[in-house]
Image: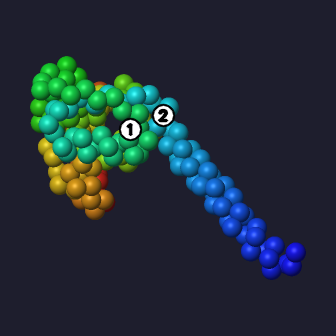
Amino acid sequence: MKPIKIIFTFAPAAALALGLASFGAVGMAHADSHSDMADHGTMHVTKSPTCGCCGAWVALAREEGYDIEVTDTADVTSVKLDNDVPGKMWACHTAMIDGYVVEGHVPFAALAKLLEERPDIAGIAVPGMPGGSPGMGNDPAARYDVMAFGGDAGEGEVFYQAGL
């Protein structure tokens, strides 16, 4: 067989094999980049079944690699009261992960900081529903504060500033 025919015969098979090999490597790199989230166990999110922005936040959390369990309920207030979330910090959904309360549309950089630093606080919150926060438009340039509460944070102090 002539060399040019050999190249044209085997080139498609070689390209396919190379493509499949690189696809597997990309998949493995993606899985490795989220392995730290799995170390914190399942995040339990309580939200209203009709709240679209809460569902959007949950979807983004899953994309970030968090294992999520959702409880839909019409009574989100009792979860906030049971976990001592200060009234001025309430938002639409409440999550629990690795012993911490995560209230509202908390950006995932703040959540990662919480889980890495493990401060002596009860949790973090994004009061209300600020535009641009995850689930509320997801604009990385949006500016708002993530508040810490309980433990060393008392009634509340700034834990993280989004958009800076």
User: In the image, 18: left or right of 34?
Assistant: right
Residue 38's disc is 2
Give the residue type that dot 2 points to: Ala
Q: Position of residue 126 (x, y in %)?
A: 22, 43
User: In the image, 42: left or right of 145?
Assistant: right
Q: Quadrant of residue 124?
A: top left
160 lies above or below 66 = below
Residue at screen point 41% across, 33% down: 67
Return the residue at label 1.
114
Give the residue type that dot 1 points to: Leu
Q: Position of residue 151 (x, y in %)?
A: 29, 27
Dot 2: few (<14), some (14–19), or many (≥20) neighbours within 10 Å? few
| Residue 64 seen by the camera | yes
User: In the image, 11: left or right of 93?
Assistant: right
What number of labels is visible?
Answer: 2
Depth order, front residue of 131/5: 5
Q: Pick the quarter of the image with the N terminus.
A: bottom right
Residue at screen point 41% across, 38% down: 66
Q: Quadrant of residue 45?
A: top left
